Image: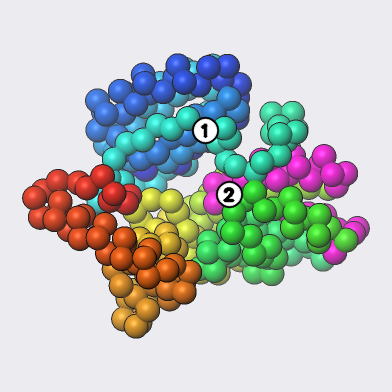
Amino acid sequence: MFTIAALYHFTRFPEPAALREPLLDLCLKERVKGTLLLAREGINGTIAGPRAGIDAVLKHIRALPGCADLEWKESSADQMPFNRMKVRLKREIVTMGQPDVDPRARVGHYVDAADWNALIEAPDVAVIDTRNDYEVAIGTFEGAIDPVTRSFGEFPAWWEANKARFHNKRIAMFCTGGIRCEKSTNYLLGQGVEDVYHLKGGILKYLEVVPEDESRWNGECFVFDGRVSVGHGLVEGPHELCYACRRPILPEDKARPEYEHGVSCHHCVSETSAEDKARFRERQRQVALAEARGEMHIGQRD
């Protein structure tokens, strides 16, 4: 079994580039794979590996400036959900494009998973899903509002266009692991919204600790690793990825005429040109040739 750790932490890294190589070297040494993002505002990512390797990497991260109280969420898989290890330098660890947003200054009220149902069932509470449209499509909370955003950076514009709908409402927001809500709640507080709440630990914590017979969650939760989706108890879901558009699909969707492995699915078949599809076919051919040689092609997706 492989241990999977999803983590984020907002802190101040004056020189994130100086942290990259030691962190990457340790991950490679400990046979840990996944993606970690470093920026001046902190660290974010998901990694997987043997128990001892994950422990070593988490110990290293907790020793970084301001990371002593790092929290993370764990699950497991019987297959390695990543192909490689990447430590990337980014402008933001979750991209919102709002330079004045700073979760270290203040955020909304944290709500434990055990208390979430009572909050979202209150008549004066509006529940907003801050994730992308393709994530919402496979699962969300009962009654949650879907902003239908293709990226988190679209959320501020959506709020500006829709804020009148939420007059005299308390706002409860949620996302996969909690990181997007750190920024979205800070943003709403800066817009003058007083009563802002978010699900502590995100959907993953809720699915881990809330019994299914008490759950207000419908469907699966998209995750950014090889499992693609998880359900209650963080059990791996049925979804796979379309490697052309990175959207989740079900096994039966592969029987649809729009599906071509690595080239298109019913979500994206009309979004790419014939030239794009030809390029995707060639990439997939090269991936298949590399796999036949027991190698990993540079264009192969995690």
Q: Relative to the observer, which residue lies in front, 291 or 167?
A: 291
Give the residue at x 27% y 64%: 281
Residue 137's quadrant in the figure? bottom right
Q: Which residue is mark 2?
A: 202
Can the viewer see residue 219 in this picture? yes
Looking at the image, the residue that sits furthest to the front is 275
Q: Which residue extends farthest left?
A: 293
Front residue of 111 and 141: 141
Question: What's the residue type where badge 1 is placed?
Answer: Lys
Q: Position of residue 174 (x, y in %)?
A: 64, 53
The crowding category of the residue bearing disc 1, from other C-alpha atoms within 10 Å (few below 14, some 14 to 19, many at least 20), is: some
Residue hosting label 1: 90
**In terms of secondary structure, where does tag 1 sit?**
loop
Front residue (pair 84, 104):
84
The alpha-carbon separation of the residues under discs 2 and 1 comes to: 23 Å
Q: Is residue 232 left or right of residue 113?
A: left
Whole-percent x and y of residue 157? 75, 54
Colour option used: rainbow
Give the mark nearest the N terminus, 2 or 1.
1
Q: Is residue 297 magenta?
A: no
Q: Residue furthest right?
A: 168
Q: Magenta residues?
A: 165-194
Residue sitting at x 10%, y 55%? 292
